[in-house]
Amino acid sequence: MRPQQLRLGIVDDHPVYRAGLAAVLQQSSRAIRVRWTARGIEDAVELQETEPVDGMLVDLHLDGGQSGVDGVGAILARHPGVRLIVLSGLASDLDIAEVKAAGAAGFVHKSAPVDEMVATILDLPAQRPAGWDRGRPQKSVTP
């Protein structure tokens, strides 16, 4: 019997990143099925209504001034059962704390190795915190 796949949506304003991430994730794990990609929060909310997913990867900084913190709140207000992991290449500790407080299940840095990103995604169904300490870049010390 084949295990059930985790249905995933990807929300990012960069089309090449969305397509590349979807391809890499599906090639890296049979347990992940990327069902759709969206360029913004509104698109993700609409797609979740017609093609529901178990979890979403949501970029922290979207074009048009869309904030990942606001996006997490907007998605969860309409679809409280979906689990969200926030992605970012540029995130401060404050950003990460804010998305966690808004209800995101986890965070993964865009530069994280693929196996760490996959592990973070696969933590979603277990209702464990997903990747809060995984895939974060080392902090630099500044004077």
Image: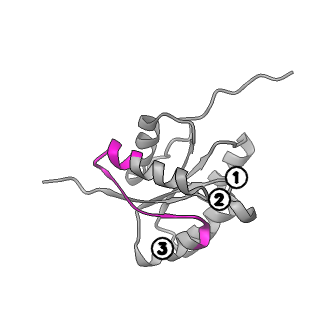
- N-term mark: 3 or 2: 3
Position of 54 compared to 102: left or right? Answer: left
- Residue 131 position in % (x across, y down): 51, 41
Queried whether the magenta region covers residue 28, the answer comes back as yes
Q: Which residue is mark 3?
A: 47
Label 3 secondary element: helix
Q: Which residue is mark 1?
A: 98
- Residue 44 position in % (x across, y down): 53, 69
In front of the other: 13 or 58: 13
User: In terms of image quadrants, where is residue 76?
Assistant: bottom right
User: In terms of image quadrants, where is residue 6?
Assistant: bottom left
Q: Contact, CB < 8 Å: mark 3 with mark 2?
A: no
Amino acid residing under circle 3? Leu
Question: What span is in magenta?
Answer: 24-42
Amino acid residing under circle 2? Ala
Q: Is residue 66 visible?
A: no
Single out the residue that lies furthest toward the right. 143
Per the model, the C-alpha gap separating discs 1 and 3 is 25 Å
Label 1 secondary element: helix
Q: Contact, CB < 8 Å: mark 1 with mark 2?
A: yes
- N-term mark: 1 or 3: 3
Q: Which residue is mark 2?
A: 102
- Residue 17 position in % (x across, y down): 54, 50
Queried whether the magenta region covers residue 65, the answer comes back as no
Label 2 secondary element: helix
User: Which residue does the image show at 49% across and 45% down from the upper left?
Assistant: 130
Q: Nearer the viewer, mark 3 or mark 2?
A: 3
Amino acid residing under circle 1? Glu
For the N terminus, the quadrant is bottom left
